[in-house]
Each structure stands twice: as C-alpha cells, then as structure tokens.
Image (spheres, coloured by chain):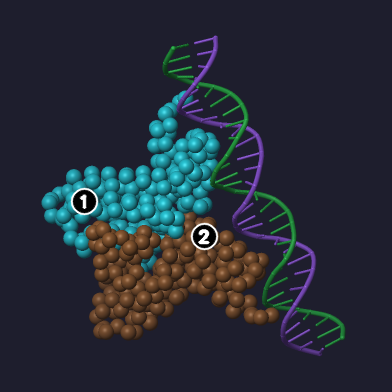
Chain colours: A brown, B cyan, C purple, D green
Amino acid sequence: MRSTAEARRVTVLNTAVSVFARAGFHATPVTAVAAAAGISEAYVFRLFSGKLGLFVAAAGACFDRIADAIEAGAERAGGDSPQEILDAMGGAYAELIADRDLLLFQVQAQAVTDIPEVAEAVRAGYRRVATFVQSRAGASDAQVQQFFAYGQLCHLIVTAGLEQVPEPWARALTAGIRHP
Amino acid sequence: MRSTAEARRVTVLNTAVSVFARAGFHATPVTAVAAAAGISEAYVFRLFSGKLGLFVAAAGACFDRIADAIEAGAERAGGDSPQEILDAMGGAYAELIADRDLLLFQVQAQAVTDIPEVAEAVRAGYRRVATFVQSRAGASDAQVQQFFAYGQLCHLIVTAGLEQVPEPWARALTAGIRHP
DNA sequence: CTTGTTTGTGAGTGCACACTTACATACATG
DNA sequence: CATGTATGTAAGTGTGCACTCACAAACAAG
C-alpha cells in the first residue's frame, strides 16, 4: 500500500484532465491516463466505474479548478463595480488556462455531450461557474452573457491556434485577449 | 454506373457533415457515413483518402454552406450600417443552424484540431468567414470579434442544451439568441 | 460483340482498446 | 505469526473498426 484509494483518485483525476484534453474522450485510451498517472490500467478501472465514469469525474475536477480560480480572482478585484470584478475574474481565468489543459478539456467535454452523463456534467459545471459569477460580481444578465461569450471565443482561438496566425482577421479575433 | 464519382462525393460530404456532427470524428465509424449515404463502406474509402480525408473534406463543405448563408443574409440587410449588416448575417446564421448539424460539426472539428489537417481546415473556414464578414459589413475589429464571440456562445448553448434549462443562469446565457 | 473504363461491393485482415479475472504484495490487528 | 483487508498488477478476452482486395456490374467505343 503506497497510497490510499481516495488520494489515488485525486491524482488520477488531475492527470486525466490533462490527458483527455489533448485528444478527447474517444481517442484517448484508458492506458494513456494510467501510464501518465503511473499506475496500471486495471487499477484505473477499479478506482472508477469505466472510462465514462473517469471522464465525468475528470469534468468535475476541471470545473472545480476553474471555479476556484475565478473565486480567487474576484478577491483581487481592484474595485467593487460589476465590471471591475468581472475583469478580475476574466484575468484569473486567462492565467489559469495558460497551460491550455483546462480549456481544451472543456472543448473535449462539449464535443461528447451526446453522452447524457457528460452533458449533465457540463451543465453542472457551467451552472456552478455562472451562478457564482453573477452573484459575486452582481453583474447583469447581459454582462454575464458577454463574459461567457468571450470565454467561448478563447476556445476557438486556442483550438485553431489563431494566436500564431499573423493575418488581419486572426488579429481581430484575438485582440485584447490576454495571453491565450 | 448510377452516378458519377464527383456527384457521389458531394452527396457523401453532406451526409458526412450530419453524421459526424452527432458523435464526432473518432466515435463515428465510416460505416455509419456510408450507410447514411446509401453506399458501401469500401466505396467511401475509394472516393476519399481515408477517414481523415473524408472528415477534412466535410469540414470544407460545412464552412462553404456557412459562408454562403452569411453572404445571402447580408444581401437581405435592412440598412447599410455595419451593425445592421452584422445583425442580418447573424440572423441568417441562426436560421441556418436551426437543424444543429452545421453547428455541431464545427464543435466536433474544433475538438480534433490536434490533428494538423483538421486544424488547418478549421483555420481556412474561419479565415473565409471572418474576412468576408469584416469586408462585407465594413465592421470594426471589435465588432467582428463580438460577432464570433456570440457565435461561439451558441456552441455552448446547443451542446449543453441550455435552451431546455429553466434556471436563471441559463436564461441569462441564452437571452436574445435567436432560436438555437 | 469485345474490350476497356468507371462505378460499386462482399468478404476478409489485422490491430487497438474497453473491460475482466486471477493473482500478488503491502499493511493492520490480534 | 496468522488472518484479514486494501492496494495493485499481468495477462488475457472479445469486439469494433479502419482499411484492403478480389471481383461484379454498368456503360462507352470500336
């Protein structure tokens, strides 16, 4: 016994977020997650109820980390106005996704929402983040909507690699987005 | 000989967009596309260079249809101001994606941008649409950016099924989005 | 009708991968 | 030390799927 099962689950989940982020649910064999976590494939299947259970749990971990980062960002806001708090949250989010894993995992999760369990996990994640953003910033519906619209734009920018494209249209889409 | 190979390719591509849209690249067997197109799997492999070639070609067809719709929408704009033309384009896009296939295909394509050929196809698609929107509407960079940000928000709304969620946060995110 | 070309398919082949089972090893407790 | 329990794995098993190949049927042209 090197570790407790619960501690293993936590480390496996964090590596699962990173590994699933690259190639997505269907293109990522459980072996890849197991190898990255340093344990055997068989043990992953004992820790989680199948590949789907692992992915859904990883989605939970992903949104947990996002919610925590946004919450911490709000604490560092320069002022009390909704827009100032939203900007602080956006900045914290931009810093968090600099390593791209959390952002890409969200994209991968949205791509497999034809699986009901995944769709519910995605809704639960955005429910948590959206309700917190709205209540903590005291922002209007329109401000919250804009916050998430530009968040989703980041998904396009990163997946398409637009920050590497020097053409004018790409510069227009990436303008003002903090180091994505 | 029932049809020419070129005509077959066109019909296969349009069915491929619909079929890939549902479960994505890796979870969709070529058999599924072939069956939906009413031909054998073997013939699909003769018409296209492998599953990846089929998917990339389908991406081209997808963005072709989007570009055409936006172009047609611009013609029906109520006025000449950039915002009016953008609104007309947005309306045309909203109508087009009512059947969800084109929208979901974009999501699936963005999810497999770890494959370089797909990433390039996605960039080419958005390059075409973005440059047209900017030049045709005469819109500012910020207006173009906003146009695409809210377009990407539609992806989240549809994949997560937010239009079916009666809770306040979901209403905020979907407010003003035309029948997604 | 014969020969050639294009359209089309049935029947494989080989491999990757989700999931299981039987077994091993560490640690705790009496 | 004996027994029990939790952690961990090696070695399968079965299936689904990308891709191929040998072959058939339709059409064209001489």
Q: Locate the C terminus of chain A by quadrant.
A: bottom left
Q: Chain of mark 2?
A: A
Front residue of this view, candidates B42 and A138: B42
Circles 2, 1 touching at the beta carbon (< 8 Å): no
Helix, strand, or loop for circle 1? Answer: helix
What amino acid type is highlighted by mark number 1? Ala
Q: Which mark is residue B88?
A: 1
Residue B120 higher or lower than A51, as above or below: above
Query: Pointer 2: what residue?
Result: A25
Q: Can see residue B175? A: no
Residue at the spot 30% in from the left edge and 79% down from the top edge: A88
Instruction: Say whether residue B149 is left or right of residue A37.
Output: left
Front residue of this view, candidates A101 and A152: A101
For the view shown, which residue lies furthest in the left direction? B80
What amino acid type is highlighted by mark number 2? Phe
Q: Chain of mark 1?
A: B
Front residue of this view, candidates B49 and B84: B49
Front residue of this view, candidates B22 and B114: B114
Pair 2/1: label in front = 2
Residue at the spot 43% in from the left edge and 28% down from the top edge: B3
Helix, strand, or loop for circle 2? Answer: loop
> Where residue A29 sits: x, y (%)?
57, 60
Q: Can see residue B63? A: yes
